[in-house]
Image (cartoon, grey):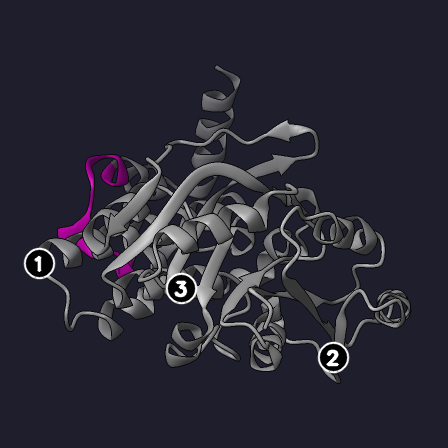
Amino acid sequence: MCKFSVIVPVHNKASTLLDSLTCLYNQTFKNFEIIVVDDASTDGSLQILIQEERKGKLRLFQRDEPGPGGYAARNYGAQQATSQWLVFFDADDLLVYDHLSIFANAISENPSINFFVNAFRKMEGNIVVPRSESLQNGVLSRQAALAAFSRSDFIHMNGACIRKSTFMALGGFPVGRYRRAGDVYFWLKVICSLKMVHYDPTVTSMWLLHNSGVVSDKSNMTQTHPCLDLKSELKVGLSWIEKHYLNASINRKILSWAVEKKIAGRSVETDIRSLILFGMRPRQWMTLATLIIPQPYYGRLRERVLSE
């Protein structure tokens, strides 16, 4: 049995597909399978994948209709997996060659843990997007993981490894509910469902923002942030301090999405009303104060701040 099943959803990624697959082919850890789910591509991606399958490089599956965010494709790929460990990878990003070996070593040293996270790096073209925080290497309690999530996104799709049984028990990624940020919703749900997670600060994946059509398409942000749904779904079984950090995490994501909406000229009234006031942090109050500023003045204020 393979140690890992790497799930790769593909929808019209012909220009980046081979570069991304090469990152997998060149992994130093070799005991894994690649499961690619083509999500109704029309740009030649499927033809590339058929050739790679014929070479014995991967297992290829096809879906007839593309699903928003690739969540349905990932869930389908997970169902086909022969390994007990699932790793997800987007076909327009990059991996460092020891990505899987770091997961393998951490699993061997922590056999009771069900969820492992490696650090990732955001890239905007050739520019590295600064990270606000770096966590220590090792096991994090649920409280510590929620506290970390309330401060920053330390989990990305490409940097996560989860036991298949845990993924299935939690229902997989939310299909048909969200066009964007359903993965963020799911990772926070995972943290709340487990007593411990493991984090390694070694950067092993690159999130190439300029390739992300889901992020750049602001029409995917018509609703409030998906994490808000966790407010009512995940209160049972958490201590009061864990609930506090969960609320702070939800507020952080609502506010970050509201800022994007405000910049795009969209209304943020619903987002502001959705905030959990008892979970607000001092910096979040400052962000909220700027969001209340009328749109023309908000744009001028932002331009002035960025120019200083």
For label 1, the SS is helix
Which amino acid, by three-letter code, is at mark 3?
A: Tyr
Tell me which residue sits at (32%, 48%) in the image. 149
Q: Nearer the viewer, residue 201 or 245?
A: 201
Q: CA distance from mark 2 to mark 3?
A: 26 Å
Q: Verify whether residue 282 appears in magenta.
A: yes
Location of residue 308 with respect to 280 vertically, above or below:
above
Location of residue 160 with respect to 209 vertically, above or below:
below
Q: Residue furthest top?
A: 308
Residue 16 x %, y % = 80, 51
Q: Which residues are magenta?
A: 273-285
Q: Tell me, for residue 240, which label it has, or none.
A: 1
Marks counted in the figure total 3
Give left or right: position of 149 versus 32.
left
Tell me which residue sits at (78%, 77%) in the image. 40
Q: Residue furthest bottom?
A: 64
For label 3, the SS is helix
Q: Residue furthest left?
A: 240
Tell me which residue sits at (56%, 72%) in the image. 71
Tag 2–tag 3 contact (CB < 8 Å): no
Q: CA distance from mark 3 to mark 1?
A: 20 Å
Residue 255 x %, y % = 36, 48
Give left or right: position of 258 versus 38.
left
Residue 24 x %, y % = 70, 53
Q: Tell me, for residue 114, which label it has, or none.
A: none
The image quadrant of residue 60 is bottom right
* Location of the N terminus (image quadrant): bottom right
Label 3 environment density (alpha carbons within 10 Å; few <14, some 14–19, many ≥20): many
Q: Verify whether residue 279 appears in magenta.
A: yes
Residue at mark 2:
61
Q: Tell me, for residue 185, which label it has, or none.
A: 3
Q: Is residue 280 visible?
A: yes
